[in-house]
């Protein structure tokens, strides 16, 4: 017997890629359980399926930075009592440095994070907690079908009490911009290009000393890098990343602030126009700002 649950969850996360850098992603999770009927003539109660599997996915894979541990780009991985620090080198020679509590990461035995490489990692973890009558799991990971412009972004929210405080997690998000009440693909395309594979940092989290120190240790020009650091309820967080793949906002980087930032940017450039911005945070959720 097969029991299926579509749209069980969405994994919002970021991963390191030797060509793209930091990539924010959102993958929808569908699950099929293969097994025998239990004494209740069920494979597993739907309520248990949703809560149990979603809890594991949220705890182990969601709102984390996924690291391809077999990639030649992973040049350092150090642990201490409270944190784990990794350094990753891109094919173009740029570095990404992250220091965060160990719970902020998910390491996968692959040289590249893809749906195909992550599926067996998720399946093996889920099977550890399945009842004996569940013989197999068929998991599907899929991006949202988006027929309009979208972007991949990563951020960290230091004021958030939950896992959003992790300094590198992200989303794949569509963008809707309306001008004078009509959807405007030119403005949508502008943001999709500006924020393709971007890290959006808050000006208040900038740490010049961190960037100088890391770049000096690795023979890099600190003029080319931003450093970010903050302390949140889960611990201390640090990031050094190339300015080429970073955008700075003069406010927090919540989706509400992102929508406001987009709106103000366009209003400043086109003061006579009226705008409505729908900024998505992953799948089927977001914020609206309008003039």
Image (cartoon, rainbow, N blue to C red):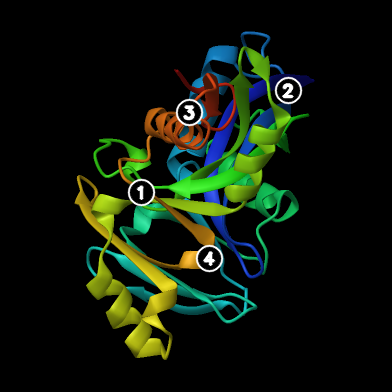
Query: Distance from label 2 to label 3 (Cα)?
Result: 64 Å
Q: Position of residue 191 (x, y in %)?
A: 60, 41
Q: Does residue 56 appear in this view? A: yes
Mark identifier at residue 36: 2
Q: Is residue 67 above or below residue 266?
A: below
Direction top: furthest residue: 40
Circle 4/circle 1 CB separation < 8 Å: no
Pick whichever of labels 4 and 1 is earlier in the sequence: 1
The residue where tag 3 is placed is: 271
The residue where tag 4 is placed is: 244
Instruction: Count numbered badges in the picture.
Output: 4
Q: Residues within 10 Å of mark 2 (few under 14, many from 20)?
A: some
The residue where tag 1 is placed is: 166
| Quadrant of the image occupied by residue 239 | bottom left
Does dot 3 land on a helix, a strand or a loop? Answer: loop
Mark identifier at residue 3: none
Does dot 2 land on a helix, a strand or a loop? Answer: loop
Q: Position of residue 6 (x, y in %)?
A: 70, 21
Q: Residue at the location (62% across, 12% down)?
A: 181
Which numbered mark, 4 or 1, is in the foreground of this view? 4
């Amino acid at each position: 017997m097969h029991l299926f649950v579509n749209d069980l969850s969405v994994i919002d996360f970021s991963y390191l890629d030797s060509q793209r850098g930091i990539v924010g992603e959102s993958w929808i999770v569908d699950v099929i359980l293969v097994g025998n009927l239990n004494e209740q003539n069920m494979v597993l109660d739907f309520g248990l399926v949703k809560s149990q599997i979603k809890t594991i996915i949220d705890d182990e894979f969601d709102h984390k930075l996924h690291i391809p541990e077999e990639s030649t780009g992973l040049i350092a991985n150090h642990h201490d009592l409270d944190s784990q620090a990794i350094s990753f080198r891109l094919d173009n020679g740029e570095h990404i440095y992250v220091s965060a509590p160990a719970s902020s990461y998910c390491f996968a035995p692959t040289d590249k994070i893809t749906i195909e490489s992550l599926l067996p990692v998720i399946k093996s973890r889920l099977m550890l907690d399945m009842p004996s009558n569940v013989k197999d799991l068929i998991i599907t990971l899929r991006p949202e079908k988006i027929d309009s412009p979208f972007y991949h972004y990563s951020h960290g929210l230091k004021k958030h009490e939950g896992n959003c405080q992790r300094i590198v997690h992200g989303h794949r998000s569509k963008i809707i911009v309306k001008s004078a009440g009509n959807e405007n693909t030119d403005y949508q395309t502008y943001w999709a290009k500006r924020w393709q594979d971007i890290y959006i940092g808050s000006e208040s989290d900038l740490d010049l000393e961190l960037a100088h120190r890391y770049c000096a240790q690795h023979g890099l020009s600190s003029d080319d890098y931003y450093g970010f650091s903050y302390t949140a309820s889960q611990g201390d967080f640090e990031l050094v990343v190339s300015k080429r793949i970073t955008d700075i906002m003069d406010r927090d980087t919540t989706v509400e602030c992102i929508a406001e930032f987009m709106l103000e940017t366009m209003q400043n450039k086109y003061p006579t126009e009226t705008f409505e911005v729908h900024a998505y945070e992953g799948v089927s959720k977001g914020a609206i700002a309008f003039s």
